[in-house]
Image: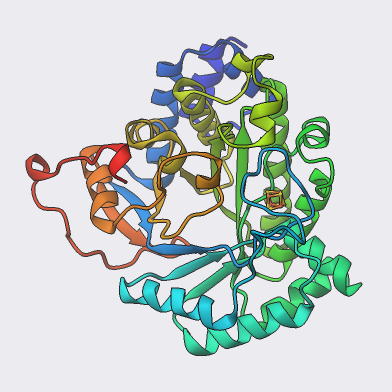
Amino acid sequence: MSWQDIIEARVSSTNRLSPEDAVILYSQAPLHALSRAANKVRKQMNGSKEVTYLIDRNINYTNICTINCQFCSFYRPPGHEETYTQTISEISERIQELENIEGVRILMQGGVNPELPIEYYTDLLKEITTRHPTIDIDCFSPIEIEGIADVTGLSTLAVLELLKEAGMHGLPGGGAEMLVDEVRKDISPKKGSPANWLKVMSEAQSLGLITSATNVIGFGEGPEQRVEHMHRVRELQDSSLAKHDIGFTSFIAWPVQLENNSYGRRNQGRNRFELGAGPSEYLRHIAISRLFFDNIPHIQASWPTMGIDVAQMALLGGADDAGSTMMEENVVSASGTDKLEASEKELQAIIIRAGFTPRRRNSRYDLLSTPEIGTKLSELACPPPSQI
Ligand code: SF4
């Protein structure tokens, strides 16, 4: 089929895009046609008026890590003078600050720290659910769960059961990057395999935990590899929905940040033009992901990595969610991006200026009552990226 026929079939019916179709779209379809088609599908799945956002806080509880991903500027190896691990009180103070601005969720992730016993995690979860009962705690990505399993000798499922019992609400989708064996071996040879990431997510979904799927592009991979990543995620989603009636809430993609890490340095001057992903490449990926994932309800636009203008274009080309305020983001910003934090007013301005109505949500994507912080469109200056 031609790319025109593939798009027509996808938009006019519930025809599922095959991996081969998706590769043809990547290779042949122009951006404007992809964005227009993805916008139609987004309207069919999520309506045309609202764009959701979340008030939350990132907490990076430890930066000690033994995995040494080449694209990561955040971690420090054990024994390094800049290592830290936060205490329950320090974390609780941060959550209190989030409560003060009506936040509803913390996203707590860190390195794979071999010095922490299982009690660090379970005591932390029990204490913060007692002190902050209205805050959802989404924490510990699959590679951290694997790390805890290694330290304790327990299975990853047993670790997840213990953490859920202690108060864990969901599992962030971090660490997926590119679920393609040859890419993962190149960028994170010590990280668990793509199959492991999918297995831990499947176990989390079997326990009813809230999960999302992420994807980092720009490692020099081709369309086939991007589609392989999406296909593996879609297959797991089919299986989890059939078995447990729960699956990934959303798909969140962004380009690798190269400024400040060994991956960027290693490739400096060599195939440099093939690394990273500019706005047009990112927008193509967002649009194709909306067309491909007929079983994942939400696609997120990434303002922190792409900037506001591109995120707004993503909202017009398949995405229906503007992500979160990201109070205290440390991992992506360690790679050299500008400060990654937006006020609720700024996020609302971004959404309104893109032509939508802002709507607060929680991590399950339940819609919440939303204050009208913005005034008239004409009075809303869209803040330049450098001020966010
Ligand atoms: S991305 Fe995560 S697992 Fe990889 S080095 Fe950084 S903190 Fe460790």
The coloring applied to the image is rainbow
Looking at the image, residue 18 lies above or below residue 305: above
Viewed as shown, does residue 165 lie left or right of 313?
right
Which quadrant of the structure image shows residue 368? bottom left
Looking at the image, residue 236 lies above or below residue 265: below
Q: Position of residue 66 (x, y in %)?
A: 79, 55
Looking at the image, residue 83 lies above or below residue 207: above
Q: Position of residue 127 (x, y in %)?
A: 58, 87
Residue extending farthest bottom: 130
Q: Position of residue 219 (x, y in %)?
A: 67, 27
| Residue at 76%, 46% in the rendered image | 68
Q: Position of residue 77 (x, y in %)?
A: 75, 55
| Residue at 75%, 72% in the rendered image | 160
Question: Visible in this render: residue 129?
Answer: yes
* Near-viewer residue (347 or 9): 347
Q: How many marks?
A: 0
Question: Visible in this render: residue 24?
Answer: no
* Near-viewer residue (263 or 13): 263
Residue extending farthest right: 153
Viewed as shown, does residue 108 lie left or right of 356?
right
| Residue at 43%, 43% in the rendered image | 304
Looking at the image, residue 143 lies above or below residue 283: below
Q: Quadrant of the N terminus?
A: top right
* Near-viewer residue (338 or 141): 338
Which quadrant of the structure image shows residue 101? bottom left
Which quadrant of the structure image shows residue 134? bottom left
| Residue at 17%, 60% in the rendered image | 372
* Near-viewer residue (355 or 92): 92
